[in-house]
Amino acid sequence: MQQSNTYIITFSVILTIVLGLLLSGTSQVLGPMQKEAIALDQKKQILGAVISGDEVAAMTPDDVNTYYNSHIASTVVDANGREVAGVAAQAVDVAKNYKKSAAERQFPVYIFHEEGDPAKVKSYVFPIYGAGLWDAIWGFLALDTDMNTIGGITLAHAGETPGLGARITEPGVQARFEGKQIFDEGGDLVAIEMQKGEGKDYDSNPHQVDGMSGATITAYGVNNMLKNYLGYYQPYIESKKSSTAVAAL
Amino acid sequence: MSVETLEKTIVKKPAEVLLSKRRRKLVSDPLVDDNPITIQVLGICSALAVTTQMKPTLVMAISVIFVVVMANLTISLMRNTIPSRVRIIVQLAVVATLVTLVSEVLKAFAFDMYKELSVFVGLIITNCIVMGRLEAFALGNKPYDSVLDGFGSALGYAWIILAVAFFRELWGSGAVFGIPVFEYVSSLFGPDFKLATNGLMVSPVGAFIILGLIIWVQRTKTGYVEN
């Protein structure tokens, strides 16, 4: 059956409008729920950096919210490590800030403390963001109160290759960072470097972790991300370091 | 004789039974004899990628069933109005819309699943089974038959990927639907006994091996030979 061009064009236009309305309608209806799901997922990632991933996975959404509210405080700092007043950490979109120059960015800090007592800090959680092989990668890095030892890390990605770069989301890979140190003996920031290749033992080196076979570029992306963001947070980290040192005296 | 035939043409054909033999065949054929994965060898990409565990595989299977059935229904309903010169793009638009709907719903109600399946939900668009059924069946058949045909094909896809996922998760992670079967079985044989898992099963290579074995068993039983 051969139809006229007018028919084809009319048909296409109507189809486009109908499908477009259907999609935008769905997006409108589901939007709030998706936002909630994303916020919950972020809380899970933050908690995953400070407590075990299995524990977080076992929590219901309500549990996550309750635990988060009673254990996590937050603040926002600028590139000089000074706190920015009047900005909620959750409102800072790390991905959007990533496009600004480092000096203009705002950096959220999540503070993990003992239940209900923000003064008793257990660790500091810093959002990190960067580029993997194909697309963005991001995560949360927890530093112990010595501001040097990594308490835990969660990593996520938008489009790394499943089975290769996407393995940064695996608990086994993330566990490799735990206990590593970001400052060398002289007090200089060296961050952590994931190595090329897999299966070697890096227990003796506090700044290196075992790599992911076949995903070296993603691993380098993780390294750059860590180095950049620890650099941005360095003024804040140093300030906390000196204050805990004073407290220790 | 001729009078009889004349009468017969006037008598309205009785409506086909809801699940007539022909219609049952529409559903059952793609399960084994004309399986989209093992016989037509379509949809292999996702069959390899999402089958490391049962849970995401089940979600994927349900998503594909939904998309194929709804796409078949929609295209079949529109089949007399679709201009033949743009039919492929029309099919694509319908399929893409359905897939986006699935993806949005997952994002709202099962965010973890959405993250885990990531690109593969979107890639249902390119799953050859969907377009294949639209071109081969829905464009020329009535809605109800098309729904049955789509359901059959999607089910044929679903049970194969679930079977692959079952063996991959069992041997690769020692679990079924996240329940640690190996751990339990090992504990029955005393503290020193431990069933080992095979890392090969977690990688896509494992899926190839399992899929190959399934095809082998199936073709031995049905005697199917490619020509």
Image (cartoon, coloured by chain):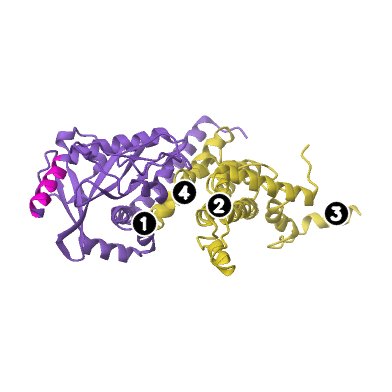
Chain colours: A purple, B yellow
In the picture, the disc for residue B117 is 4
Mark 4 and mark 3 lie on one chain; the one further toward the N terminus is 3
Question: How many other residues sit within 10 Å of disc 4, few (<14), some (14-19) or many (≥20)?
Answer: many
Quarter assignment of residue A184:
top left
Q: Marks 1/4: CA distance?
A: 19 Å
Residue at the image position 59 percent from the left and 67 percent from the top: B189
Identify the residue position indicated by label 3 in the image: B5
**A241 falls in the magenta region:** yes
Question: How many other residues sit within 10 Å of disc 2, few (<14), some (14-19) or many (≥20)?
Answer: many
Please state the horizontal and vertical placement of residue A107, each as a whole percent of the image.
18, 43
Q: Secondary structure at mark 1?
A: helix
Tell me the kind of residue under disc 4: Leu
Tell me the kind of residue under disc 2: Gly
Which range is magenta? Answer: A235-247
Mark 2 and mark 4 lie on one chain; the one further toward the N terminus is 4
Question: How many other residues sit within 10 Å of disc 1, few (<14), some (14-19) or many (≥20)?
Answer: some
Determine if marks 2 and 4 fall on one subunit: yes
Identify the residue position indicated by label 1 in the image: A53
